Image (cartoon, rainbow, N blue to C red):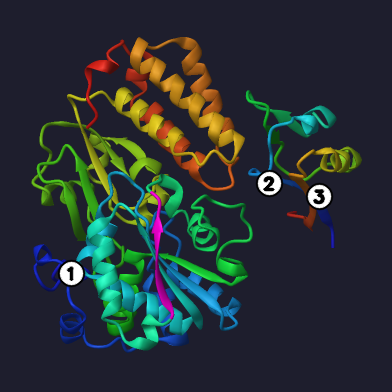
Amino acid sequence: MSDLRLLSGPDLRSGSESHADHVRRLGAPALAGRPLVEALVRSGLTGRGGASFPAGLKWRAMAAASKGAAVVIANGAEGEPQSGKDRLLMATRPHLILDGAFIAARTLRASQVVIYIGEEHGAAWTAMVRALAERPEFERRIARMAGAPHRYVAGESSAAVHLVDAGVATPTTTPPQPHQRGVGGAPTLVQNVETLAHVALIARYGDEWYRSAGRRGAAGTILITLAGGVKTRGVLEVEAGTTVAEAVAMGGGPSEPAAAVLIGGYFGSWVKAVDAWALPLDAAALRAGGLSLGCGVVGVLPASRCGVCDTARIMRYLAEESSAQCGPCFFGLRALSDACSRIAERGTNRDDMARLKKWAVEVPGRGACKHPDGAVTFLRSALSTFSDQFESHSAHWRQQQPA
Amino acid sequence: MKTELHMTIDRIKCDGHGLCGELVPELIRLDDWGYPIITPGPIPDRLAPLAQRAVATCPVLALALHRAAASR
């Protein structure tokens, strides 16, 4: 097959595809309603926002709960600093996303569609506004835009609902999950924009077609972002199951010898480079190995950089991005981050190592959202991948600039 | 059907007053910042009254008890 599905069509550098060009190229979606929900279940499509939850099962639960006043939120609040795939898709193929969102609205009998986009994603915002204006009146009537603040947690699904409801993009206590009780109390589908774009294609070509791409038992294609020490950083569409080595080769290969790879972004895991190359980029396969695809970031750490220092820097970021609502997250991540920084700055000390190991067990699972869990998953992967460096780190943090 | 008692906590409401940890240390210990860590699993019957007191005493009403079908 041609590798490109979401990103096929006109040159991406020519900007967003117009509605007329989009319809001419792809025609109208054929499937909606229950047959589409069942096709989504069979397709194996999973959410591309980070949690990799099966989209079909989410739609099925929504369809059962909807009484005609459901809400659909197309989630384009891409808070992950190293990820660029959602904004690229919004800026170039807005109508695939809108197709998916309006198909969801029809299928789930929703009365509102909210396009939720990071306020700092200028090109994506402009493209989506323009695309929405090109849609037919019956779709425009139920749709509106909502801006997400530039915060890591703003893309979390309960935070998206909270923003739409109350203008505050902080997570809320779950259950109830958004699909049970979301915007204004109505069942709400919060679905990542890439996931919706896949839905738009499955509604045209079916689940068998979707599964006809994919390698090593995986289904479909995924958008990934190559970051860090690769020759060409940026967004790629690859078949699910493509290995890390193959994906990095598509970006021209490592820019210098690699020490480790961060798979899945800041809620993901460091893996030693030697172990990372053969890993398939597929949600199910990675999960089976205790890893996660997350939002599809593949970040390469060059051997010349210090894994402890980069870990300290990212932990500082994640601690600052806590929404400060839950004590174990706010205080716990700050304490973990401080301990990492002390080790990075002044060298290893036994007390901080002991604290890191203790808190890494105590903090996860004790927030309203998964922010502390994601941060600790990341930290634990660092403690194991860079165990030698953590055990005997010398003071040199200030000499390294952020990647 | 056999049921068992579980304690849940609203992490956003919880302000780390720590009364729960003092009332039922068998069930709740406090972390280094004073926030509760609840022992996983069902609450033993003998601790149910104390657990109920902890729920009632929490100044911000962050704790709740609920019954669920026994897992075994």
Quick one: label 3, few (<14), some, or many (20+) residues within 10 Å? Answer: some
Tell me the chain of label 3: B
Residue A37 lies, in percent from the top left, at: 45, 80
Q: Is residue A155 left or right of residue A127?
A: right
Which residue is rendered at x = 22% and y = 56% of the image?
A242
Which residue is rendered at x = 36% and y = 39% of the image?
A269
Q: Which residue is mark 3?
A: B5
Of badges 2 and 1, the one in the foreground is 1
Q: Which residue is mark 2?
A: B10
The image quadrant that residue A228 belongs to is top left
Mark 3: amino acid: Leu
What's the CA distance linking mark 2 and mark 3?
17 Å
Quick one: label 2, few (<14), some, or many (20+) residues within 10 Å? Answer: some
Looking at the rendered structure, the secondary structure element under dot 1 is loop
Residue A387 lies, in percent from the top left, at: 37, 22
Q: How many marks?
A: 3
Q: Which residue is mark 1?
A: A16
Tell me the chain of label 1: A
What's the CA distance linking mark 2 and mark 1?
44 Å
Callouts 3 and 1 in the same chain:
no
**Would you say residue A333 is visible in this rendering?**
yes
Q: Is residue A94 left or right of residue A46?
A: left
Q: Is residue A324 left or right of residue A207?
A: right
The image quadrant that residue A135 belongs to is bottom left
Q: Which residues are magenta?
A: A142-149
Majority secondary structure of magenta residues: strand
Tag shown at residue A238? none
